[in-house]
Image (cartoon, rainbow, N blue to C red):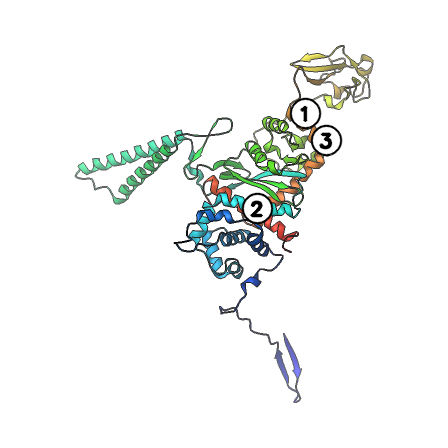
């Protein structure tokens, strides 16, 4: 900013604004580390929790250095820096070590004793059981603060890639064939080299070709060793063979909206009151239906008689619903056709992307002629039927059994159907069919109503729809927070035990954030 100023001698001078120089160069500053954790922040709640409210004595059993050996890093310090790093989207153990050396908040949490990255990595990958107990301890604090109401638990999962190669997946038979091919290729190359050695006019095999033979033999030996260590194929819930993975055999190939990936499913059970995660598990399968009952078994101590479990259609199966009914657990689990029956989603198809004409190979369905039975007004109790034109149909004698189903049939009168203006719309062949016949099912003979049908009736009722509508607003924001705010886009460890610990650490971050933002450590 420049101002023109007139002096006493009549000259005009330019005057410039003057600011303090901001120096951001490194310097030595006396800092009180305890004052860097501001009340109300995540790091303040984290520090207070692990120092005062969560029992960490179970970590001590591993150490035997009271008389000899170097002092170890306190488990509370390692938990603090790891959880705070995860809250900032920092997952790499090297990046966490660097932050402890350079970032003042990390320094305040670790007391300016930056742990080595190998210590951090070993702590995360080997203390899964202790991390699970810390998760339970923080959950108990949430419960004591009144953040868990147990009115409704929403169960859902997110599929994330893992630290495994998708190209190294297959069955044992696939690996056997691949190892044989590698051995045959190496044998062929060796024979070709030996043949060239005997020919005086041929040059000796190059060093690159020799390295290739050695590489093929090494890969075949590694595959044979893996097959020896894993003598059995992986089996699914129904006994079918699943593909194994030579990088991480606990992970699985999963179909997602972005293609097939190699990874794990992180399942979370969330309380509807304040979105507290009451259970967190990671599984190496993409089949959500087989994960429901393990989750239910884990959350049983949290359930009350009135607690309602909700889950989407991926967890729906007759076997799951039967087990829930046997255990008297109230649940609302959608089926694949729920939205088609809900009039609120009647126009959802118009918002879907039109398929490309060159790739859409399905035939266009022909519109069915004639009014469908659901367009007739049928009263099962009064046993009456009224057609779309408002005419009453006559019931045809006794009920009949067709393909195991009890049906009640109705027939229109000649005097009503012949002059009807809707005749062309009601009958498929109005020129040859004199009157309309319609039948309504009344259930199967000697067969009780399935659990799927009972769940369908419960979830289609007004109360069921209102309760199930809360599921999306309960669990989806949790995954949005973990995936986008915390940067959880993949699991960086291998093996279900380690991945499960990492998933619980991220869920711990979410729960501690809720404590910090709501009422705890304010």
- Disc 1, SS: loop
- Residue occupying image coordinates x 66% and y 51%: 518
Q: Residue 126 in the image: state x and y as whole percent.
A: 45, 45
Mark before the other along the chain sequence, 1 or 2: 2
Q: Earlier in the sequence, mark 1 or mark 3?
A: 1
The one of 139 and 382 positioned closer to us in this rendering: 139
In the image: residue 441, left or right of residue 122: right
Q: Dot 1 corresponds to which residue?
A: 367
Q: Is residue 453 above or below residue 213?
A: above
**Which disc, if any, is residue 461?**
3
Quarter of the rendering containing residue 350: top right
Measuring from the top left, give residue 289's x and y in whole percent.
Answer: 57, 31
From the viewer's side, name the closer residue of 70 and 189.
70
The label shown at residue 137 is 2
Q: CA distance from mark 1 to mark 2?
A: 60 Å
Q: In this view of the protein, can residue 283 be seen by the observer?
A: yes
Q: Nearer the viewer, residue 12 or 255?
A: 255
**Label 2 neighbour load within 10 Å: few <14, some 14-19, many 20+:** some
């Amino acid at each position: 900013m420049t101002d023109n100023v007139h002096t006493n001698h009549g000259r005009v001078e330019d005057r410039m604004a003057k600011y303090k120089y901001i120096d951001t160069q490194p310097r030595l500053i006396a800092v009180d580390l305890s004052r860097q954790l501001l009340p109300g922040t995540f790091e303040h709640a984290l520090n207070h929790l692990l120092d005062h409210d969560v029992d960490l004595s179970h970590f001590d059993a591993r150490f035997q250095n009271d008389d000899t050996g170097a002092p170890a890093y306190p488990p509370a310090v390692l938990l603090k820096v790891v959880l705070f790093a995860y809250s900032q989207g920092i997952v790499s153990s090297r990046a966490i070590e660097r932050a402890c050396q350079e970032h003042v908040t990390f320094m305040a949490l670790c007391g300016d004793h930056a742990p080595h990255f190998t210590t951090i990595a070993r702590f995360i990958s080997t203390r899964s059981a202790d991390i699970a107990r810390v998760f339970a301890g923080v959950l108990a604090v949430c419960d004591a603060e009144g953040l868990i109401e147990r009115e409704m638990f929403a169960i859902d999962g997110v599929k994330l890639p893992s630290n495994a190669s998708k190209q190294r997946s297959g069955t044992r038979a696939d690996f056997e064939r691949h190892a044989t091919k590698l051995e045959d290729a190496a044998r062929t190359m060796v024979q070709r080299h030996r043949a060239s050695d005997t020919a005086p006019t041929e040059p000796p095999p190059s060093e690159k070709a020799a390295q290739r033979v050695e590489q093929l033999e090494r890969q075949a030996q590694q595959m044979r060793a893996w097959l020896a260590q894993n003598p059995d194929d992986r089996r699914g819930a129904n006994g079918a063979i699943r593909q194994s993975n030579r990088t991480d055999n606990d992970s699985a190939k999963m179909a997602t909206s972005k293609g097939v990936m190699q990874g794990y499913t992180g399942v979370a059970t969330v309380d509807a009151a304040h979105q507290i995660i009451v259970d967190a598990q990671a599984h190496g399968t993409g089949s959500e239906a087989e994960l429901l009952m393990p989750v239910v078994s884990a959350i049983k101590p949290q359930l009350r008689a009135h607690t309602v479990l909700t889950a989407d259609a991926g967890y729906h199966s007759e076997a799951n619903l039967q087990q829930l009914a046997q255990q008297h657990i109230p649940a609302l689990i959608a089926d694949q056709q729920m939205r088609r029956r809900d009039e609120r989603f009647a126009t959802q198809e118009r918002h879907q992307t039109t398929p490309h004409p060159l790739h859409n190979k399905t035939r266009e369905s022909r519109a069915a002629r004639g009014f469908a039975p659901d367009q007739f007004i049928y009263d099962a109790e009064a046993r009456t039927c009224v057609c779309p034109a408002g005419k009453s149909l006559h019931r045809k004698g006794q009920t009949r059994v067709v393909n195991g189903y009890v049906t009640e049939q109705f027939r229109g009168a000649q005097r009503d159907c012949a002059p009807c203006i809707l005749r062309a719309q009601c009958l498929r062949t109005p020129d040859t069919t004199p009157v309309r016949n319609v039948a309504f099912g009344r259930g199967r003979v000697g067969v009780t109503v399935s659990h799927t049908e009972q769940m369908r009736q419960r979830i289609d009722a007004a109360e069921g729809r209102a309760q199930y509508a809360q599921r999306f607003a309960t669990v989806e924001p949790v995954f949005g927070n973990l995936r986008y705010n915390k940067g959880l886009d993949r699991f960086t460890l291998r093996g279900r035990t380690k991945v499960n610990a990492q998933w619980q650490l991220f869920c711990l971050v979410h729960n501690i954030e809720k404590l910090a933002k709501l009422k705890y450590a304010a």
